[in-house]
Amino acid sequence: MSGLGELAPLIDRFGRVARKLRISVTDRCNFRCSFCMPRNPVWLDRSELLTFEEIGRVARIFARMGVSKVRLTGGEPLMRRGIERLVEILSSIEGIESVSMTTNGYLLEEMAERLKRAGLSGVTVSLHSLKPERYEQIVGVPGVFEKVVRGIRRAIEVGLSPVKVNVVITRGCNDDEVLDFAELARRTGISVRFIEYMPFDGERLWRPDLVVSGDEIVRTIQERYALVPLEREPGSTSVNYRFADGAPGTIGVITSMTRPFCSDCDRVRLKADGKLVPCMFSTAEYDLKPLLRGGATDEEIEAFIRSAFWNKFEGVESLLRRHRVPSHVRPMYTFGG
Ligand code: SAM
Ligand code: SF4
């Protein structure tokens, strides 16, 4: 009964069309990155989490409205038991072209092969420093660096593609490693993406002066290696570059704080507890769980999603235009970035 294009596209009042769904599968995490988690997180009760069947049903409805890419996130998505079963469910949905994941990589070494078999396409591993001690300080857990690096290697070995690395750069913490990460890209062919620090930490420690802009990051790399901008895909969160000398690997900057691309944003987020978040810079959330657990039909759920998405906030761009500094909305671990 389902099929891509069967239903009209999902569209908001600014004419933006949803193509990508980010699904947070848990708020729990085995790490404690200070830019994401509070010191004492309060976890959702397990009964509040959508089941894999519920997530699959929602994804199927989104796919019928033209959403074709799904990314799993969290918390730490690999902490959700049996996650490969969800990958299998999602990747078998007609119209879903790719299911990828953003992970801290700690459990990737042992899970990469199963995930690949289940149909996972790409994986993005967050790696915020190449210095083991500093990395472990950032994520708040000692002795984990080497295992995360082995996870990245394993992901490449089993053929997950693309394998990317995400680095949140914060001033005074890891901004001295920009070139080292560029060299990692050149050495390994990995795509390294630098993310501007967003005000979604757990202890409200974010300050504008801690943000290192994408422009500054690109300038730092250009002082050593000439970069050539790649054409930006519509809806992409990042501006990407290749090395002018033909070295492998690419560099991306996710400039959510200084140069956001809200006007062609094609994303919508589903939290682990079933709340839809059309824009992460807005507090607006729309709870699907009562419908899912209250006997609503697919048509009723579709209508609910359409009305939620129609009201999507214009975006952080509109705040910057009015010279307003974006402020804390909700911590990252609660919705997955
Ligand atoms: N646990 C997984 C991980 O760390 O990759 C997935 C969830 S995490 C919330 C998703 C992405 O958000 C990660 O790349 C993480 O580094 C990034 N992130 C977390 N807090 C951030 C912040 N305050 N600003 C920018 N990016 C952040
Ligand atoms: Fe966990 Fe990812 Fe948040 Fe770090 S960024 S605390 S790994 S959810």
Image (cartoon, helix red, strand yellow):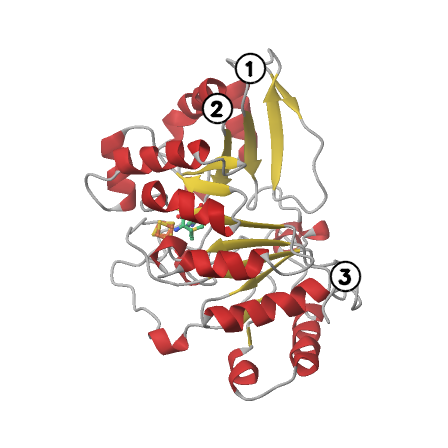
| Inter-mark Cα distance, 1 to 2 | 9 Å
Residues packed near mark 1 inside 10 Å, few (<14), some (14 to 19) or many (20 plus): some
Mark toward the start of the polypeptide (2 vs 3): 3
Q: Residue at x 79, y 62 (%)?
A: 5
Residue 51 found in image quarter: bottom left
Q: Are marks 1 and 2 in contact (CB under 8 Å)?
A: yes
Kindly identify which numbered label has been placed on residue 247: 1
The residue pinned by badge 2 equals 185
Q: Where does the image place residue 207, in percent across and percent down from the top left?
A: 41, 48
Mark 3 CB within 8 Å of ligand 1 = no
| Inter-mark Cα distance, 1 to 3 | 40 Å
Q: Nearer the viewer, mark 1 or mark 3?
A: 1
Is 73 on the left or on the right of 22, as rendered? left
Mark 2 CB within 8 Å of ligand 1 = no
Is 218 on the left or on the right of 170, as rendered? right
Residue 284 in sight from this viewpoint? no
The residue pinned by badge 3 equals 14
Q: Residue at x 79, y 60 (%)?
A: 15
Residue toward you, 308 or 74: 74
Please name the amino acid that badge 2 sits on: Ala
Q: Where does the image place residue 108, in percent across and percent down from the top left?
A: 36, 44
Mark 3 lies on a secondary structure that is loop
| Inter-mark Cα distance, 2 to 3 | 37 Å
Please name the amino acid that badge 1 sits on: Ala
